[in-house]
Image (cartoon, rainbow, N blue to C red):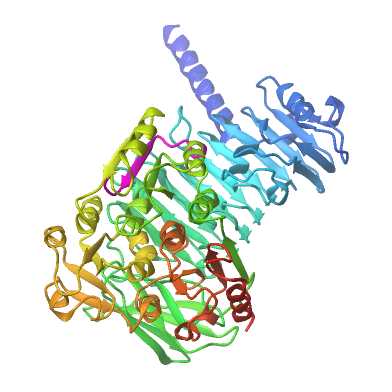
């Protein structure tokens, strides 16, 4: 009898375990729709095709399931959504959209919103033919970058199928963590179209088992990074594990089609694993950044970039258009790059110590196919990266301007920062202390704002408040930015740090000590143009800037050079003499007969982007200084011009750009320049 009871208990246990498995399978693989209750949103008060806010009525439908699994059905029509309130989705629901059903976002001025909010829940499916129409074009505010179509955070077993998500103030889809759960898990984005969103098509911040399949991401534009898909954790506690991007197309996004930026994972012991298949459909390029201290694998069509499985990986190549005279990208450090067309080498260059390369090529025709290979120092050759020459789209000249230098700095800040923990503050009256601040600002993810030496301008005070800054770093001594300004900032509860020395050389050295690069930029300390021309490149690459005299290296600069192994010397022998040049570690000179030729030498000689160029006056320093951090975000060079004329030295490279951003009002860079640039774009 006891044996029989034991057998019965075992059978019951197995049945229980089997039932659990069936439930788990039900939630983690597929919903059986025929077994679920379906409720339309219309009986709860939602009305299609009118101007009334439908958010509350749709939420009532959702909440009516009271945690039970079921289907929320959206019949064909347009529903007006208050995305600040959001449609908050609980666990175990299907959202089913009939073809022609639209969630239309009501215009707002909020820095952040979520049309559909999926946070700390599990087992959600979005099926049918959802369309989310964002309000980027009708947004009534100017700040913020976090207006999301679908926000998935700290959630598990989520799928989004056959959706179209357009023109949101931030991302089409955001996948990340919450305070309760440090990653989202088992997320599938399949056959989704994302177009014209402002910041990203899709952000993958923290996730495990994430799939982006059969999707199309286009025309992301409005706020950096402006990529198709951005895989970019915010800190080293977040997770990037088993990410698969397959059979997905990206095109005409302002930045790369796929961005992988892992520098915030520094110190993490959790390996990353990213796999990208069908990369030939990523028409606007793949960028991989910040992987030096990262463990794991990044595989792109069978080639590995973060493991020893390949001796030499294929070059990652930026898009090439019919106006391009250079090809840029990244490859194995110090490898030789060859560009090949019809079995003939048409361009050769060398990847630098960061792996970046810039190869000159002749102009190509739309549709031409090029192959790019890397050959390492042992003679091993990579597989070719094949690219097609495409036409240039969305040619445009932008201008960021204020009434004066102080207000232009504010406009630049508002163009790129919604909030910032840190602000760099320096004088707008003279250049020496301010000149070398760009790389530090980029490292701190901070805008550069200007002040008068004796009094903090009202607009700058208000901008610090708008940014919700907690810390202000002042560049320069009290002669440059007075002690009264420092006291005022402290009285407002701000943490204030001053980086200033007895002279410009010491101030530059103090700032340089905050950057870890073994490379250094050095230029003439008695004038500003040469340093401004290189400032965006130095900022983007974390390279400190030091100052020198024409014929002698100051003691402060000499001390700061200890431990450096390479020097980029900016300017001709007329400003940095041969004796100084020979005393520097492994110097390479970028200089010309005047400030404009030096600017051209930097643009042509260093691996800077060739999509957008920032234009600033060569006659004064403030606009180029405060714009250098924004230019670095776009990997764009700074091109110095005369107030009413583009120097002839640039004319052979202007046509290779598809956009220009002018820094400053027509008083410093005239409308005539703007007209000339527009003509160059259409040539």
Q: Nearer the viewer, residue 237 or 50?
A: 50
Q: Where in the figure is residue 449, as x and y percent of width and height?
A: 43, 49
Q: How many marks?
A: 0
Is residue 41 shown in magenta?
no
In the image, farthest residue toward the top:
1
Whether residue 601 is visible, yes or no, is yes
Q: Where in the figure is residue 362, as x and y percent of width and height?
A: 47, 89
In the image, farthest residue toward the front:
454
Q: Quadrant of the C terminus?
A: bottom right
**Rendering quarter of residue 538:** bottom left
Q: Nearer the viewer, residue 225 or 193?
A: 225
Look at the picture and state if 128 lies above or below 634.
Answer: above
Q: Nearer the viewer, residue 250 or 439?
A: 439
In the image, taking residue 528 as reference, residue 226 lies left or right, namely right
Q: Where in the figure is residue 68, as x and y percent of width and height?
A: 67, 22
Is residue 470 shown in magenta?
yes
**Rendering quarter of residue 221:** bottom right
* Residue positioned 50% across, 19% down in the render: 11
Q: Nearer the viewer, residue 571 or 132?
A: 571
* Residue positioned 73% across, 41% down in the render: 107
Q: Quadrant of the N terminus?
A: top left
Whether residue 253 is visible, yes or no, is no
Look at the picture and state if 376 lies above or below 562.
Answer: below
Q: Which residues are magenta?
A: 466-477
Q: Where in the figure is residue 372, as x and y percent of width and height?
A: 41, 80
Look at the picture and state if 170 lies above or below 157.
Answer: below
């Amino acid at each position: 009898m006891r044996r029989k009871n034991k057998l019965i208990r075992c059978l019951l246990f197995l049945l229980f375990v089997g039932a659990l498995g069936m439930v788990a399978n039900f939630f983690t693989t597929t919903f059986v729709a025929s077994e679920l209750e379906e409720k339309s949103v219309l009986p709860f008060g939602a009305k299609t095709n009118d101007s009334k806010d439908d958010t509350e009525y749709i939420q009532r439908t959702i909440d009516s399931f009271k945690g039970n699994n079921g289907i929320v059905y959206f019949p064909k029509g347009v529903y007006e959504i208050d995305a600040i309130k959001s449609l908050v989705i609980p666990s175990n629901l299907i959202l089913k959209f009939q073809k022609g059903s639209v969630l239309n976002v009501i215009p707002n001025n909020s820095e952040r919103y979520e049309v559909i909010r999926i946070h700390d829940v599990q087992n959600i499916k979005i099926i049918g033919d959802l369309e989310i129409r964002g309000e980027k074009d009708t947004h009534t505010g100017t700040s913020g970058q976090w207006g999301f179509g679908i926000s998935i955070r700290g959630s598990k077993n989520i799928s989004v199928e056959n959706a179209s998500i357009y023109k949101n103030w931030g991302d089409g889809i955001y996948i990340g963590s919450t305070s309760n759960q440090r990653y989202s898990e088992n997320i599938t984005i399949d056959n989704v179209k994302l177009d014209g969103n402002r910041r990203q098509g899709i952000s993958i911040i923290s996730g495990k088992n994430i799939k982006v399949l059969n999707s199309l991401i286009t025309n992301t534009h409005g706020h950096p990074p402006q990529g198709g898909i951005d895989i970019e954790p915010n800190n080293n506690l977040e997770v990037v594990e088993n990410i698969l991007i397959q059979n997905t197309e990206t095109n005409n996004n302002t930045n790369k089609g796929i961005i992988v930026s892992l520098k915030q994972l520094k110190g993490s012991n959790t390996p990353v694993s990213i796999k990208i298949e069908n990369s030939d459909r990523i028409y606007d390029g793949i960028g991989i950044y910040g992987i030096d201290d990262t463990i794991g694998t990044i595989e792109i069509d069978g080639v590995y970039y973060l493991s020893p499985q390949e001796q030499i990986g294929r070059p990652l190549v930026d898009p090439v258009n019919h106006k391009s005279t250079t090809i840029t990208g990244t490859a194995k450090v110090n490898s030789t790059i060859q560009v090949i067309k019809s079995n003939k080498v048409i361009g050769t260059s060398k990847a630098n110590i960061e792996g970046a390369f810039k190869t000159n090529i002749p102009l190509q025709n739309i549709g031409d196919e090029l192959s790019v290979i890397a050959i390492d120092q042992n003679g091993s050759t990579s597989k070719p990266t094949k690219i097609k020459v495409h036409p240039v789209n969305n040619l445009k000249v932008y201008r960021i301007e204020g009434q004066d230098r102080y207000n232009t700095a504010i406009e630049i800040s508002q163009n790129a920062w919604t909030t910032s923990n840190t602000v760099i503050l320096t004088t707008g009256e003279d250049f020496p202390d301010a000149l070398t601040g760009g790389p530090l600002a980029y490292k701190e993810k901070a805008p550069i704002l200007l002040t008068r030496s004796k009094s903090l301008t009202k607009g700058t005070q208000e901008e610090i408040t708008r940014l919700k800054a907690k810390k202000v770093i002042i560049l320069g001594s009290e002669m440059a930015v007075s002690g009264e300004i420092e006291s005022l900032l402290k009285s407002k509860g701000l943490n204030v740090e001053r980086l200033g020395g007895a002279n410009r050389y010491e101030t530059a050295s103090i700032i340089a000590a905050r950057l870890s690069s073994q490379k250094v930029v050095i230029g003439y300390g008695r004038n500003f143009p040469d340093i401004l021309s290189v400032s965006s490149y130095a900022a983007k690459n974390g390279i400190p800037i030091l100052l020198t005299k024409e014929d002698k290296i100051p003691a402060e600069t000499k001390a700061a050079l200890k431990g450096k192994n390479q020097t980029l010397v900016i300017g001709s022998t007329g400003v940095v003499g041969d004796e100084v040049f020979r005393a520097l570690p492994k110097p390479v000179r970028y200089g010309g007969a005047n400030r404009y030729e030096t600017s051209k030498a930097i643009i042509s000689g260093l691996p800077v982007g060739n999509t957008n160029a920032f234009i600033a006056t060569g006659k004064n320093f403030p606009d180029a200084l405060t714009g250098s951090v924004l230019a670095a975000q776009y990997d764009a060079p700074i091109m110095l011009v005369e107030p009413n004329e583009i120097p002839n030295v640039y004319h052979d490279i202007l046509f290779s750009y598809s956009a220009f951003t002018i820094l400053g009002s027509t008083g410093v860079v005239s409308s005539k320049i703007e007209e000339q640039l527009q003509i160059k774009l259409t040539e």
